[in-house]
């Protein structure tokens, strides 16, 4: 009887520690399963930012939103695809963004295009700095 009490007491003391460790591992596994997800900005946030910076008209907003949603969907699909390397995935993401960017640019007035080009240049600079901090290549594509 005394031995049974010792076993139950030991289990009662160790069970919470085991559950805490399991929960910590679960959180790590979830983060590892979606390492790039944090890099996809929310569509509504992007739309609000572009609306404010470019002064989008009520007619342009739903068109831009549709383009941004398509970009998000393509990027999420790409992140779920197995690929041969990080560079390949980065190139595909860049291609998706450039495609969406050209569609958005086609909707804009000349004044908005100028502002949009500046925003894109700033985005590129931020990406270059981030890539530089991680030790990646920081080459700029020339058209």
Image (cartoon, helix red, strand yellow):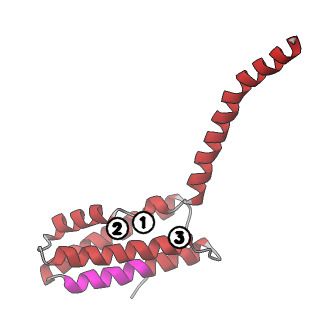
Q: Looking at the picture, does residue 138 appear above or below residue 32? A: below
On-image quarter of the N terminus: top right
Q: Which mark is residue 79?
A: 3
Span colored in magenta: 96-107
Sequence-wise first label, 3 or 2:
3
Q: Residue at x 58, y 53 (%)?
A: 30
Is 78 on the left or on the right of 61, as rendered? right
Which residue occupies the foreground of this view, 47 or 23?
23
Figure quadrant of residue 67:
bottom left
Mark 2 in CB contact with mark 1 (< 8 angstroms): yes
Residue 40 in the image: x percent, y percent? 41, 64
Q: Judge by depth and name the residue closer to the eye, 84 or 117.
A: 84
The residue beneath circle 1 is 127
> Mark 2: few, some, or many residues within 10 Å (few <14, many ≥20)?
few
Find residue 124 and report its horizontal and vertical position in percent. Answer: 37, 70
Image coords of residue 75 (percent x, y):
45, 73
Q: Is residue 140 visible?
A: no
**If the image is split into quadrants, where does the C terminus sit?**
bottom left
- Quick check: marks 1 and 3 in contact, CB under 8 Å? no
Depicted 38 relative to depicted 108: above or below: above
CA distance separating discs 3 and 2: 20 Å
Of 132 and 92, nearer the camera is: 92
Local secondary structure at mark 3: helix
- Is 54 displayed left or right of 127 in the figure? left
Identified at 19% across, 73% down, the residue is: 61
**Nearer the viewer's eye, disc 1 or disc 3?**
3
Disc number placed over residue 123 in the picture, else none: 2
């Amino acid at each position: 009887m005394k031995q049974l009490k010792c076993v139950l007491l030991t289990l009662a003391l160790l069970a919470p520690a085991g559950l805490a460790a399991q929960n910590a591992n679960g959180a790590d596994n979830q983060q590892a399963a979606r390492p790039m997800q944090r890099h996809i900005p929310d569509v509504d946030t992007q739309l609000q930012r572009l609306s404010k910076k470019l002064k989008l008209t009520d007619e342009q907003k739903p068109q831009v939103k549709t383009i941004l949603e398509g970009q998000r969907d393509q990027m999420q699909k790409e992140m779920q695809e197995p690929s041969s390397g990080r560079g390949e995935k980065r190139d595909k993401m860049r291609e998706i963004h450039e495609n969406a960017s050209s569609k958005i640019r086609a909707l804009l007035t000349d004044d908005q295009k100028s502002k949009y080009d500046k925003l894109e240049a700033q985005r590129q600079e931020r990406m270059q700095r981030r890539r530089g901090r991680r030790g990646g290549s920081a080459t700029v594509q020339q058209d």
